[in-house]
Amino acid sequence: MHEITADVCVVGAGIAGCSAAIESARLGRSVVLVDSLPLIGGQMVHSLIGLFAGVFGNAPGYAQLTHGVFDDIFASLEPTGDLYFARGHTTTVFYNEVALGAWLERTVRDLGIQVVTGAVLGEVVLRDGFVSAVGLATRYGDVRVRAAGYVDASGDAALTWQAGAACWVPSRPIYGSQQVIVENLDEAHKPEPGEIDALFAARGEEFGLLRRGGLAFFFPGTVPRC
């Protein structure tokens, strides 16, 4: 079995995994980035529509809610015309998926991040209650990664589940983003722009929210969505 050692092993190379790998490498850590696909980027590069929704809050402030790797992506792709911002009830970010994929590959390469693609997570080795190694199956043979720390960015808690840690299992499948749908509202009383953000800011700490802003979509005459 081929073995790789690193400070950090990130399982999943979508937006969360790439962000974790890039930030870890910039902090001087050696990083292994693992994904089951034959390339990195996940849905943000290989979906049907190239857009980021949820990075910015509602009108009228349009506050940026998420920074980190997004700031680097915006700074690199906007000047070349491969990314632009469209404002409505919020700010939606449209981008060229090919250009973003190339940016990710250059960034990962320049930071010296080791990439293992086409790998299926199998064995998870525990030591004193912590993950000490993971076993991967690839078309070229088995690979074992030993690291001091692990990031589960798989999207479905694959590493956490395989390690035997507690996982919340919903009573029914949940696909994609989770939203609250509120029906049969009197449209005369819908929140004004910025009102939802003000409520998040006022009550965010009470509910343990990391974000202090949110999104709301209103469809008059049909179903208001929050």
Image (tube, rainbow, N blue to C red):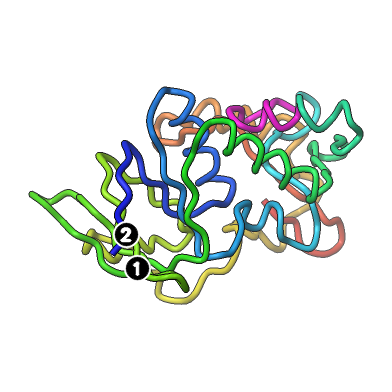
x, y (%) of residue 65?
A: 63, 30
Q: Residue at x 71, y 32 (%)?
A: 73
Residue visible at 80% across and 40% down in the picture = 93
Q: Which residue is mark 2?
A: 2
Distance from label 2 to label 1 (Cα)?
Answer: 7 Å
Give the vertical position of 123 relative to 112 (above or below).
Answer: below
Rendered view: 146 above or below 29: below
Secondary element at tag 2: strand
Please state which amino acid type lies under the numbered disc 2. His
Region rendered in magenta: 62-74
In the picture, which quadrant includes the N terminus? Answer: bottom left
Q: Is residue 78 left or right of residue 171?
A: right
Q: Residue at x 80, y 41 (%)?
A: 92
Residue 179: numbered disc: none
Give the x, y percent position of residue 133: 24, 54
Q: Amino acid at mark 1?
A: Asp
- Residue at numbered disc 1: 142
